[in-house]
Image: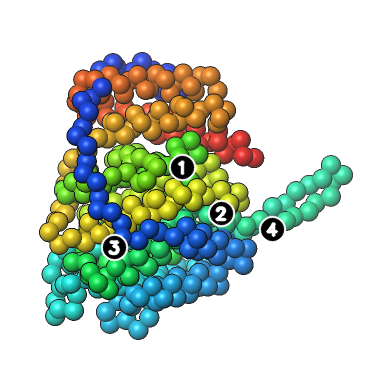
Amino acid sequence: MRYLPLSLLLLLLLPLPLRADDDAPAAPAAPAAKTAPSIDRIRADCEWLCAVERMGRKAWEHREASAAYIAKAFKDAGLQPLPGKADYFDDHDVDAPFDKARNVVGWLPGKKAGTTKDKPGSYVILSAHYDHLGAFQRKTTAEDGTESSELLVAPGADDNASGTAALLEIARLLAAEAKTKPLDRSVVFLAFDLEEQNLIGSRAYAAKPPLPLDQMAAFVTMDQLGRSLVDVTPGTLFLMGTESCAGLSKVLDELDAPKGGKKLILGIDFQPGYSDYVPFKDKKLPYLFVTSGTCADYHAVTDTPDKLEWPHLAARTAWCRDLTVMLADAKRTFTWLEEPAYHPEEMKGLRAAIAEVEKGGGGLGLPEFAMGMLKNYGAFLDKILADGEVTKQERMQARATALMLFNMAAQIARQAKR
């Protein structure tokens, strides 16, 4: 993900226009899960992917080994290869220096599978990327001029062993449940390769899909599920993309927040970087991006499994499983919207996120001026909520300021780790 320069924070000093929403009715609870995700299995998958033998999952031999691990997990769970495929691999020739992208695809047939021609909306995709940044040499020079180097590995626990582990666990749970109660729609479990390299794996898949994309009902990708936004929003799950698709907001309304946490719905333009939803968004296909936010160890050698919040990761895994079940319900339809329709809860979600960052700002070591900016911004959002509506201009300002604040907090958090 890319961040805005700190110099733009000066814009926050400009006066903000002044503008609590009525309490929304409580959303009905999602059906109770039949089987809870296993923290032990999730942990084992994360630790295997992050082990030093995988060397950060960037070089081909380490991505190949990771892909084989994921394929075996799909097979052991009871998933099938895609129709017409002999194995679980979706390989694409790509430009140097990588030469090959290896996506891993598992298929859970729904009630509509097996017909001569599946109809539009016959399957959903649940995805996560499994690659990371690899290893690199760090050179140092001692006071006496002696040079030395050491090999450092970026294990990528939160980014994105956490999402991959959730994908594998959901495959196990849904495949087991489907033995007695098949889903209406089929589910494609998709582990993308080379997300960290400009989304090579997902772009290749979308360019040459093994299944027609016009038959897909919805696409979901999970990226960074194990920590929280700069480590000060524990338990929070951010949901982005509903504004471009009629029908997705209703599904999220019907799902409670993950156990012990909360769900915040924001437009995808509040995301400072990007993930594997981009090729599907570009094709105007219904999509949802699910993330717990960028942690303080993002893209660092310190993003290790011991720092993952295992109960929250398990709760988010359970939530994504329930989401997948609801998307696979054939009675639900999802339609692309040419003009975004922002969810009415968006400003509430943004206000809650800012409150969490403000509350944890002391622990981050945010300077006094930054805390003042957070307070000023919170007041701005409170006025919008009190008014009960938000103008296009106010939303644009709310978005720009939020990105600056999140970027500032992330940079300060990363500097504190050094």
* Position in image of residue 393 (x %, y %): 24, 26
Where residue 235 sits, quadrant-wise, is: top left
Q: Amino acid at mark 4?
A: Leu
Q: What's the amino acid at mark 3? A: Ile
Residue 21 x/y as whole percent: 23, 25
Rate crowding at label 3 as few (under 14), some (14 to 19) or many (20 or more) other CA atoms within 10 Å: many
Looking at the rendered structure, the kind of residue marked 1 is Ser
Disc 1 to disc 4, C-alpha distance: 28 Å
- Name the spot of residue 124 as percent of width and height, x first: 25, 63
Q: What residue would you read off at disc 3? A: 125
The mark closer to the camera, 4 or 3, is: 3
Figure check: 10 above or below 222: above
Location of mark 1 (residue): 228
Q: Nearer the viewer, mark 2 or mark 4?
A: 2
Residue at x-position 28% and y-position 31%: 347
Q: State how far apart marks 1 and 2 are (Cα).
A: 14 Å
Compared across the picture, whether 307 is left or right of 166 comes to right
- Which of pointers 1 and 3 lies earlier in the amino acid sequence? 3
Return the residue at label 4: 151
Instruction: Look at 22% across and 69% down and name the residue there.
Output: 181
**How many C-alpha atoms fall within 10 Å of the one at disc 2: few (<14), some, or many (≥20)?**
many
2 and 4 marks in contact (CB < 8 Å)? no
Instruction: Residue 344: tell me if it is visible.
Output: no
Left or right placement of residue 237 versus residue 411 in this view: left
Residue 308: image x %, image y %? 52, 50
The residue carrying mark 2 is 305
Callout 1 touching callout 2 (CB < 8 Å): no
